[in-house]
Image (tube, rainbow, N blue to C red):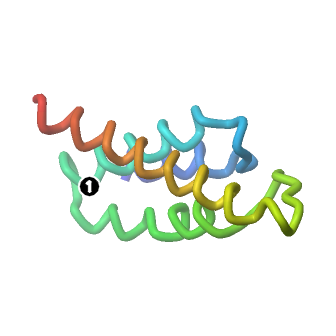
Amino acid sequence: MYTSTLAFAFAFAPNSLQNNHRTLATTLIFATGGIVGWPFALALALPFVFEELFIYVADLVAPEAKISWMVRRWTRLFMAGLAALLTFVSL
């Protein structure tokens, strides 16, 4: 419960390509809650993942740059997930 609350506190920050700390911290905290605490806490991360991948929020994206924007966002979320995985595998 505490990790989900903390992760949502990070997830409420505006989403943009310049805010890498938000993605990494939210992913690590959701992973901690799901692995250490309650596995269904990972289901609470689905709205965050949807927003991270598909919603512009603070980014101003030209129509011709939409594909590169999406690739960068998907790569950033994948790298944050990989960091969370490697953190818990190494323990």
Horizontal relation, residue 9 to residue 37: left or right: right
Measuring 43% from the left and 66% from the top, which residue is drawn there?
Answer: 44
Measuring 54% from the left and 43% from the top, which residue is drawn there?
Answer: 23
Measuring 88% from the left and 55% from the top, which residue is drawn there?
Answer: 60
Vertical order, 87 against 42 (above or below): above
> Taking the image as drawn, is residue 47 in sight?
yes
| Three-letter residue code for mark 1 | Gly
Horizontal relation, residue 75 to residue 29: left or right: right
The quadrant of the rendering that contains the C terminus is top left
Q: How many marks?
A: 1
Picture coordinates of residue 46 (x, y %)? 46, 69
Horizontal relation, residue 57 to residue 91: left or right: right
**Residue 83 lies in quadrant:** top left
Characterize the local packing of mark 1: few (<14), some (14-19) or many (20 or more) Cα atoms within 10 angstroms. Answer: some
**Residue 65 lies in quadrant:** bottom right
Measuring 70% from the left and 43% from the top, which residue is drawn there?
Answer: 17
Vertical order, 29 against 66 (above or below): above
Between residue 30 and residue 76, name the one nearer to us. Answer: 76
> Taking the image as drawn, is residue 2 in sight?
no
**Residue 67 lies in quadrant:** bottom right
Regarding mark 1 in the picture, which secondary structure is present there? helix
Q: Residue furthest front?
A: 64
Residue bearing the label numbered 1: 34
Picture coordinates of residue 89 (x, y %)? 12, 38
Horizontal relation, residue 49 to residue 12: left or right: left
